[in-house]
Amino acid sequence: MVGWLVERVVPEYVPNALRRARVPELVDDALLTRREIEARDALDQFERDALKRREELEHERDEAHT
């Protein structure tokens, strides 16, 4: 029941409630500004780049250890 409320009722009848609750993954892209979408996408890219770099560094460490 709660899932239905969050997924169906709240976005339809009180769309700004999700924004006020600060649950970004529940806010539909249609409710975001261009800057918000760009910032979110930039953060996602940053996370992917950081993870890739971490994997590279861990590989270098492992190589140096052996």
Image: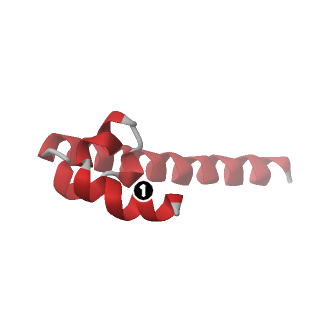
Q: Residue at x 34, y 44 (%)?
A: 18
Q: Residues within 10 Å of mark 1 (few under 14, many from 20)?
A: some
Measured from the top left, where is residue 5 in percent x and y?
42, 59
Question: Which of these two is toward me, 30 or 44?
Answer: 30
Residue 56 in view here: yes
Look at the numbered disc 1 and give the secondary structure of its residue: helix
Please give the name of the residue rendered at 25% of the width and 49% of the height, measured from the top-left corner.
15
Q: Which of the image's four quarters has the C terminus?
A: bottom right
In the displayed structure, does residue 6 sit left or right of residue 36?
Answer: right
Q: Is residue 54 above or below residue 30?
A: above
Residue 50, position as x, y percentages in the image: 50, 45
Report the side of 47 relative to 64 (left or right): left
> What residue is shown at x 39% (from left), y 37% (from top)?
22
Dot 1 amino acid type = Val
Q: Find residue 6 and report its horizontal and vertical position in percent.
A: 42, 56
Judged left or right of residue 50, residue 66 is: right
The quadrant in which residue 4 appears is bottom left
Q: How many marks?
A: 1
Q: Which residue is mark 1?
A: 6
The foreground one among 23 and 6 is 6
Residue extending farthest to the right is 66
Q: Is residue 28 visible?
A: no
Colour basis: secondary structure
Q: What residue do we see at 39% from left, 62% from top? A: 7
Please tell me whether residue 36 is drawn above or below residue 49 in the rendered image: above
